[in-house]
Amino acid sequence: MKIFQTIVDLAKQSPPGTVLALATVMKVRGAAYRRPGARMLITPSGASAGIISGGCLDGDVREHARAVMSTRTARLLTYDSTSRSEIIFGLGLGCSGVVQVLVEPVVVGEPEGLLAFFENCLARKAPGRIVTAFMPGDRSALRARMLRWPGGTVTATPLRHAPVLSQAAHSVGTRRTALREVEFAEGEGRALVLVETIAPPVPLYLFGAGDDAIPIAAAAKALGWRVTVIDARPAFPTLARFPMADAVRCVKPETMGEGSVIFPPESMIMILTHQFEQDRALLRVLLPCNVRYVGVLGPRDRTVRLLAELSQAGVKFDDAAIARLHGPAGHDLGAETPEEIAVSIIAEMIAVISGRSGGELRKSARPIHDPMDVAGGSSPGAPTPGAAAPAPTPVAAGPRPGVISAPMVPAPTPVAVPRPVAVPTATPVAVPRAVAVPKAVAVPRAVAVAVPDPAPTPPPVVIPPPAPTPPPVRVPTATPVAVPVPRVVQPRQ
């Protein structure tokens, strides 16, 4: 969601009613730097947020954006880098692909526009869905759009195309992004439909607030993830140490009973307390949770020992739990410093989210990007074949023109709406779904007993070295003096 936050922040710098231009990659054939759904917002002053290419298309798109803001008419641009004419005319793409970009006007402050939709998804931290019908070959290319807002409200423009767009969205099922071809009624022709799911930020929970957790939190926040830092020591999980974190909590592992902690299924968990007993207690509670990833810092032998001791204590984990365990955590990068280790761990997490194994791209037979679902068949990102799709729901007109009150089908994205994270206490207290956990929320004293920091060790007493032994005093040797011996004279008899 980071790109949407960047777009919303830039849009807020313009007064309400200002017309901006939003460029979106709609379709790609062959190789391209960005995939469908990539966006860039352009303001009348030329400021922008986001990119739709590595820079080769952005300049030309800006020129068209000026015309779109002036005429308030959308344009569909096609860039074909399979021909040398693109290089001749100065674009120099060289990617051997065809990219179609929709440039449309958006109005700051429009209550049911795309900018308001992005802001609503961010505020609710919940998924939404965009269904856009466009017509290649037509410069006024935006045919229709349907938005499924967090909470279930659906808006459509024009209203008469809502059933067709709803059916196209239903055919996508739980896929993240897909293209469909539809035919409108009353002889209005055919169009392509891009179905996109706006997923909430990835939740990352760091159990351990040592110095090596700081670069992990910073790297995750740079990706737009939601970061929560947890530690049993009150002095460590603080916003002063982790200003980038969304939440910090002081929780002791022994207060976390099995089943007392609830995580969203898309959560990433990293255990790095550097305390073997704490890691064992945390692993016992966290590994059975239905999450994406559980990482443990330290060598492989240490993780094996953790599992062995838990097994001896009668704790058993099923295959799904063992599959989500990554110990040692991270990719084999030869990382040494805390910052390098953070890159290694975050890289592995990204690979897990993307369904990739990591490694060097030059040695992989797979394409850089997974093929996009165009015809409705299974793709690498598709659900398991044979899984039941949600039944379609009839689309009904809403209380005002262009608004549909019935939920649009299908249920959006396999990335579930984040469930409340219960504070792990004897009686879990769940945060309400629509209320973001404040950064300054402190765990009640009854949950985390503040353990005072140990008294500082007094400085060592420095014993001065003994005074140097003075050199021996040389007593001058007395010079012998010849003392005359008195002569004794015997008196005469």
Image (cartoon, grey):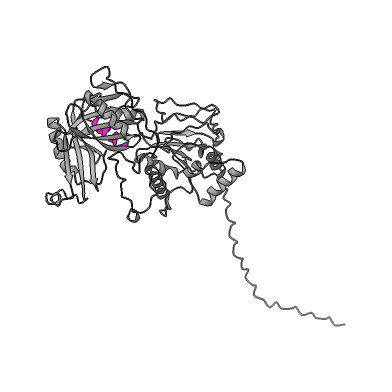
Q: Quadrant of residue 35?
A: top left
| Quarter of the figure with the C terminus | bottom right
Q: Would residue 243 be seen by someone viewing this image from the given angle?
A: no
Looking at the picture, how far across and down is residue 195, in whole percent? Answer: 28, 34
Instruction: Find the magenta span and give its range.
Output: 1-11
Whether residue 272 is situated above or below residue 171 in the rendered picture: below
Q: Main secondary structure of the magenta part?
A: helix
* Image position of 89 (left or right of 306): left
Residue 358 sits inside the magenta stretch: no
Is residue 6 inside the magenta stretch?
yes
Count of marks placed on residues: 0
Q: Point out residue 291 in the picture as x, y percentages from the top left corner.
A: 45, 38
Residue 194 seen in render: yes
Extreme residue toward the bottom, this view: 492
Q: Residue at image x 13%, y 35%? A: 139
Quarter residue 486 falls in: bottom right
Q: Position of residue 152 (x, y in %)?
A: 34, 24
Give the residue furthest to the right: 493
Q: Would you identify the image quadrant in which residue 26 lies?
A: top left
Residue 162 percent location from the top left of the image:
25, 26
Residue at position x 85%, y 82% from top? 492
Describe residue 216's horizontal placement relative to residue 57 as left or right. Answer: right
Left or right, 401 with respect to 437, comes to left
Q: Quadrant of the N terminus?
A: top left
Q: Is residue 459 above or below residue 420?
A: below
Residue 113 drawn above or below residue 225: above
Q: Residue furthest top?
A: 399
